[in-house]
Amino acid sequence: MARAARPQAPHPSTPASASASTSKGLPKASRAAARRPLTTGDYLQRILNARVYDVAVESALQFAPQLSARTGHRIWLKREDEQPVFSFKLRGAYNKMVQLSAEQRARGVICASAGNHAQGVALSARKLGCTATIVMPVTTPQLKIDAVRALGGEVVLVGDSYSDAHAHALELERRQGATFVHPFDDPDVIAGQGTIAMEILRQHQGPIDAVFVAIGGGGLVSGVAAYIKAVRPGIRVIGVQMNDSDAMLRSVRAGKRVTLHDVGLFSDGTAVKTVGAETFRLTRALVDDFEVVDTDAVCAAMKDIFQDTRAVVEPAGALGVAAAKQYAARVGGSGQTLVAITCGANMNFDRLRFVAERAEVGEEREALFAVSIPEERGSFRRLCGLIGARSVTEFDYRISDAQTAQVFVGLSTRERGESAQIAERLTGAGFATLDLTHDELAKTHIRHLVGGRSELARGERLFRFQFPERPGALMRFLSSMHPDWNISLFHYRNHGADYGRILVGLQVPRGEQRALKTFLTTLGFPFVEETDNPVYRLFLR
């Protein structure tokens, strides 16, 4: 968990986009008020008057019995994954667009989005009878592209990231005169998302201890916090971020907006490098605390949601549940009422392979180990005797040394922290054991490459890369390399995600290490060097 104090935030001017569609036609005094920073009372009024139900439904607030039984707290799910576009985003998009003038609608709207906001804008445009141009990164899953086109949106694919798409959308806005519909940094959009909190408090009028809200750009958490703090300020609003996409948390800590150099892509719905000016102002002032979760915790939460609802949410849709579980484990006790917003379900089916694999580790129902055993008769039997009745999920071995064998072992576990106990037991029996349960390299690659040592790989340096899943990415990597460098190892698995995880071994002459550093920093793909990782040295070096 990451805590952040909640000081009184400074009050920057309301963004230009905030007043473009709301101040025209108002009396002079009202226009002046529209230019000042909006207060919690202003947002309460906007939320109560928001126009969302022409396209949105009042989603269910559903009790999660299995999650509640396991955590000891009463956990409720606000099912925004049940919206017509399987995401909350249509609330804010429609509330913004319905307030445009007839002249603005005639010129059409434009937005930049990796998927969920795009579908909300496209559906709203169809309802309102205007055209919608949706600029999306070329890495956008085909599922989301097809969904936007099915709703009548004109899709323009540009760039590798949301930032590229956003820049192009602003250029089209200038050239075409269309109205830009921001995915989060607009008071009308924020007010539309705030109707979710209005529904929660109406649907559950008893005590609520905390509401957990995923944060990307901050539109959802800003709207939810604005309503809750105006109506029932005793309820804690807890923002949730991925550990590799935590721009809002870093911004709150720094007291100013921080731009991330890279963001993780697993939870693509919250992968935002820079949060909004207005959403930062509201979040800093109104959100009580933050929880930071990782990929494994989100995968486990996706499985938990499925077990209670039989619904498959997208990673961003599971952030709230992952955080609620983390919070419940930390505070202990029992009986608190916790609400998690399951904010989306635009999930590629192929990604389920990766989710299913990592869910067991995320819930710590599987533990991974590297075990060294002597190459002598009876060693395997003795190791199996120590494992006992536990289910073996993986057991990989290949002879490579006359004295010692390295075995990769996966075991099912029953509770958190059990992997450390197992490792201690194996070590105590004379088997050198390394607990790999939380090692990213082991979970993603090594478990599929055990036994890959080679005398020909001397001088090898090992790197993990993230490549965008699109044609030409690998060729760009290979063509950027010096022709004298040798690829000594290459491992890739398609997880059905928007990006590929690739492990590469490079043999680079000593005199060209500076050139290698330049190559890595100018390539543009996130990377981590794993040459000194003990797992690599045990199984592949």
Image (cartoon, grey):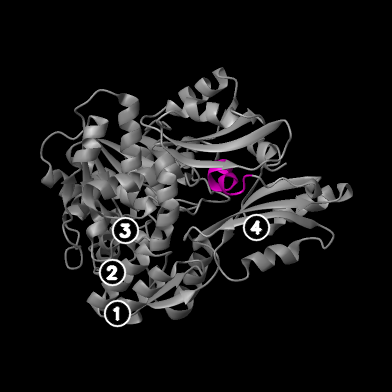
Q: Which residue is mark 4?
A: 524
Q: Which residue is mark 3?
A: 345
Q: Which residue is mark 2?
A: 97
Measure how far apart labels 1 and 4 are at the Cα level: 38 Å
Measure how far apart labels 3 and 4 are at the Cα level: 30 Å
2 and 3 marks in contact (CB < 8 Å): no
Mark 3 Cα shell of 10 Å, populated few (<14), some (14-19), many (≥20)? many
Nearer-N-terminus badge (3/4) = 3
> Residue at horizontal 35%, vertical 38%?
323
Q: Is residue 412 visible?
A: yes
1 and 2 marks in contact (CB < 8 Å): yes
Residues 123 and 312: in front is 312
Residue kind at label 4, given as amino acid type = Gly
Specify the quadrant that holds the C terminus.
top right
* Horizontal side of residue 53 vs 411, given as left or right: left
In this rendering, the label closer to the viewer, 1 or 4: 4
In this rendering, the label closer to the viewer, 2 or 3: 3
How far across and down, in percent of the image, does residue 134 sit?
41, 73
Measure how far apart labels 1 and 2 are at the Cα level: 10 Å
- Residue 235, compared with residue 358, is above or below; it is above
Residue kind at label 1, given as amino acid type = Cys
Nearer-N-terminus badge (1/2) = 2
Measure how far apart labels 2 and 3 are at the Cα level: 23 Å
Nearer-N-terminus badge (2/3) = 2
Checking the image for residue 130, the label placed there is 1
In this rendering, the label closer to the viewer, 1 or 3: 3
Residues 522 and 412: in front is 412
* Horizontal side of residue 244 vs 153, given as left or right: right
